[in-house]
Amino acid sequence: MKKMKIILLLFCSFSFTSLLVAQEKQEQPFKFVTNVSGVGTSAATFLEIGVGGRAVAMGGAYAAVANDVSALYWNPAGIAWVQGVQAEMMHTEWLADTKYDFVGLVIPVPYLRSSFGVSFISLDYGESPVRTVDRLEGTGEKYGARDFAVALSWAMSLTDRFSFGLSGKYISQRIWSETGNAMAVDVGVFYNTMLKGLRLGSSISNFGNEIQLSGRHLTTIVDPDPRVENFDRVPVNYKTSSYPLPLLFRVGISYAREIGALGNFMLAMDVNHPSNTTESINFGAEYGFAKMFYLRAGYQNLYERDSINGPTFGGGIDYYLRGRMGIRVDYSWSDWGMLKNAQRFSLGLVF
């Protein structure tokens, strides 16, 4: 019994000593970074590029302003308040020599208290020469890349102040012969409060499945074991990972007021909660004179951890003749830090 007690005591002492040593080692572990923002963890990030010269010039604070064709992107519930058939086109010389385009159409149906819309956005990366390890100067071939999304939208004014909107999207990404597709929905609400000029809006964008690329250039032939002579041509297909869409939840507020002969002004703010980065705030302001000439300014992604963009500026001209087609021209300039800037031109038609 004494021997058993001594053995047990030694075992406990050894275990306790080992525990202390292990704890000392754990006090100096590798430091893993856990406070990350999630940038670069989603696919189809072109869906995050803002639409419309007016909206972007106001810093993207548009969830509670959206009452034109660009509402198809920012908050589909906003198209319920569009007056007359409207179309809008936008072209942007986007970052790194890419080209971004938007086309949208909204058709109100008053007797249904609804509006229907269709939109198309695309990001074209251009073409580059195909290079291989053996042919660094190029094979003579060229490859291109392009992303696009097509959306059908519907909005309905449930009361004279509240509207609900829904969009269904088909999203596609392509690089050379590899493609990936996804389906998504946008949902929005819009409320014109009892306080004149004060509006609230909220939307959820890009709620859908993940994207995974596949194509013929991911298929090849390999030799799994050079030592085996009769087993040297095995067809394989490289499998790529799938990635989620950039889900974004917006909540916005705007206030517009007439200031007599001096014109009118509007202030707007959006709070953004994205799935692939930290929360941020967008601010925007608009001053209009004679309901024709407009100046705008804003700030994008304030407080976002990894943001490199910020101030936005722009202006526009709205020209309407009673009983005739109206024209709306908008311009915006956005600062992108080390990536310089992005400029947008949009043209709107009101029938």
Image (cartoon, rainbow, N blue to C red):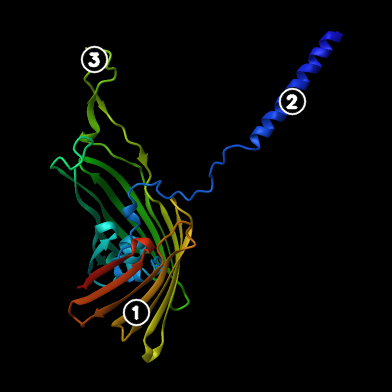
Q: Residue at x 71, y 25 (%)?
A: 18
Q: Residue at x 20, y 43 (%)?
A: 176
Of the two numbered discs 1 and 3 in the rendering, the one whose residue sits closer to the viewer? 3
For disc 2, the neighbor class at 10 Å (few under 14, some 14 to 19, many from 20) is few
| Residue at which label 2 appears | 17
For disc 3, the neighbor class at 10 Å (few under 14, some 14 to 19, many from 20) is few
- The kind of secondary structure element at disc 1 is strand
Kind of residue at disc 1: Leu
- The kind of secondary structure element at disc 3 is loop
Residue 310 or residue 55, whichever sits in front: 310
| Alpha carbon distance from label 1 to label 3 | 71 Å
Viewer can see residue 343: yes
- The kind of secondary structure element at disc 2 is helix
Residues marked 3 and 2 touching at CB (< 8 Å): no
Image spot of residue 315 (x, y percent): 31, 77
Residue 315 or residue 15, whichever sits in front: 15
Residues marked 2 and 1 touching at CB (< 8 Å): no
Q: Residue at x 31, y 46 (%)?
A: 183
- Looking at the image, residue 126 sits to the left or right of residue 271; the answer is left
Instruction: Using the image, tell me which numbered label, if any, was put on residue 71.
Output: none
Disc 1 or 3, which lies upstream in sequence? 3
| Residue at which label 3 appears | 231
Which of the 4 image quarters holds residue 111?
bottom left
Question: In which quadrant is the N terminus drawn?
Answer: top right
Image spot of residue 128 (x, y percent): 20, 48
Image spot of residue 155 (x, y percent): 33, 61
| Residue at which label 1 appears | 295
